[in-house]
Image (spheres, grey):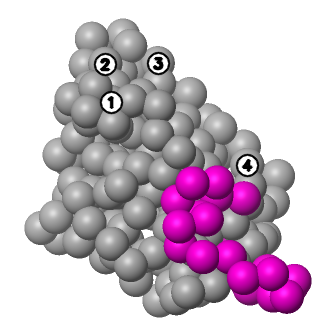
Amino acid sequence: MVTSTPVLDQSKAFSLEDYMLHPPDNTEWVDGQLVEKQGMTAKHSRVQARLARYWGNYKDDSGQGGDVYTEASCWTGTRGRRPDVSYLTPELVAQFGDFTVLPQSFSLIAEVASPDDSAEELFAKAREYLQSGCQEVWLLFPESQLVLINGQQRWILFNAGEVVSTQAVLQGFSIAINELLA
């Protein structure tokens, strides 16, 4: 995840309908405003790319199918969001095809914390995803070498030196924290 701040040029109104048809890059639609995602570091980008690659390889190798996305827009019922990494099951890929904004949350979502992210903001965003169709959320903290996962029931904490694994979606995927967050 990266910090979101309102887009500076508010002189042009940007409606929800505009966002749903053509979401501008690096933005989310939050509380009636277009906000720009900021704060991505090289480490954040590297972890994001690494997780997308691992999830993508695993869904292919395991035969589970579906698709993996980075920074793809979804609608949570109240906000337009762009999760750092997301996975959509084959059934939902077939249902929604080549969407502009997915009309619900992705099945599996990961947010990578940047140095300026607040924990409250990350947990609120995770709750928002879970309430709008997401079955499992990963919060990755590269600086602290931690991963928190919520598969609808409770938060599970994984520390450096441990192996993190999916709980509800993309069954069987696992990876060492040290490899993922290196």
Disc 4 packing (10 Å; few <14; some 14–19; many ≥20): few
Q: Nearer the viewer, mark 3 or mark 2?
A: 2
Mark 2 against mark 1, which lies toward the viewer?
1
Q: Residue tagged by mark 1?
A: 93
The part of the chain drawn in magenta is: 1-24
| Image quadrant containing the N terminus | bottom right
Residue type for callout 2: Gly
Query: Image quadrant for the C terminus?
Result: top right
* Residue name at image x 12 percent, y 67 percent: 153
Report the residue marked by disc 2: 65
Asked whether the residues under the numbered discs 2 and 1 touch, taking CB atoms below 8 Å apart as contact, a structural biologist would say: yes
Secondary structure of the residue carrying tag 2 is loop
Query: Counting residues from the N terminus, which is met first, the one under dot 3 or under dot 2?
Result: 3
Q: Earlier in the sequence, mark 1 or mark 3?
A: 3
- x, y percentage for residue 109? 40, 52
63, above or below 163, in the image: above
Q: Which residue is mark 3?
A: 57
